[in-house]
Image (cartoon, helix red, strand yellow):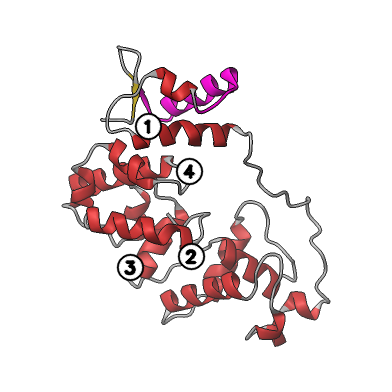
Amino acid sequence: MLQQTPVARVLPVWLEWMARWPTPKALAAEPPGEAVRHWGRLGYPRRALRLHACAKAIVAEHDGQVPSDHATLLGLPGIGDYTAAAVASFAYGGRHAVLDTNVRRVFARAVRAEEYPPTATSAAERRLAEALLPELGAARWGVAVMELGALVCTARSPRCADCPIAGTCAWRLAGKPPHAGPARKGQTYAGTDRQCRGRLLAVLRSAHGPVPKAALDAVWDEPVQRERALDGLITDGLAEHLDDGTYRLPHA
């Protein structure tokens, strides 16, 4: 839930999920559409489907217990390097480099004297992160670096005067050279297929049963974009088209 989404938006949804589904077994027992419904407006709703698939795999393959081993976690649906490292480190105290956007930015500035990290995580970044891991307290180290990036070494307005490592920060000591790579573009949302998909999915989430096509047509005026977005939801497994022409959240 926290990937690319602020804590303030995630927290109420997470609390609801934990109350409703305190264990993987509880989530796995529900249809996948219920995971999509209770994902709410967090964005990237396919993550809800992956969480549901992950819960089912944990029940089927691991007796309902979330694995502690990094390699085993990577074998679960929807679990990539970042999530596997985060779970193994923060939940089980393993020694793993957890590279989120904030951590990557801190390392880019503090060590490589670069304002921003590359667009995609590189092998060099992973080697650096692993080399910096302490032998003891790696999980605490990971949280500390994340917090440093989230609260102090921020993307747009870094608070260097408040930074505990300002005296050794390579980027600061180099005079804060500007980013030399491609211009960083902010994400647009209004009028996009993403917004259209969100509107359509909101109709399905609010209904506790199939909805007629007219109910979906009513929330987006541009018919070509609307049909494209609806087809995308079906292809991604976020919606089902029934034989009677109605639509619903996935049930299987």
Q: Secondary structure at mark 2?
A: loop
Question: At which x and y percent is residue 169?
Answer: 71, 80
Question: At label 3, which amino acid type do we have?
Answer: Ala
What's the distance in space between the residues labelled 2 and 3, CA to CA?
Answer: 12 Å
Q: Would you name the residue on which mark 1 appears? A: 204
Residue 98 marker? 2
Q: Earlier in the sequence, mark 4 or mark 2?
A: 4
Q: Nearer the viewer, mark 1 or mark 2?
A: 1
Q: Would you name the residue on which mark 3 appears? A: 91
Q: Compared with residue 40, is residue 143 higher up or lower down, i.e. above or below?
A: below
The quarter in which the C terminus is drawn is top left
Q: Compared with residue 53, is residue 180 higher up or lower down, i.e. above or below?
A: below
Viewer-proximal residue, 121 or 41? 41
Question: At label 4, which amino acid type do we have?
Answer: Tyr
Viewer-proximal residue, 223 or 249? 223
Question: At label 2, which amino acid type do we have?
Answer: Val
What's the distance in space between the residues labelled 4 and 1, CA to CA?
Answer: 15 Å
Q: Would you name the residue on which mark 4 appears? A: 44
Q: Are marks 3 and 4 in contact (CB under 8 Å)?
A: no
Can I make out residue 9 in this image?
yes
What's the distance in space between the residues labelled 1 and 2, CA to CA?
Answer: 35 Å
Q: Earlier in the sequence, mark 3 or mark 4?
A: 4
**Relative to 24, 156 lies left or right:** right
Say few, some or many: other residues with alpha carbon within 10 Å of mark 3 (under 14 / 14 to 19 / 20 or more).
Answer: few
**Relative to 125, 248 lies left or right:** left
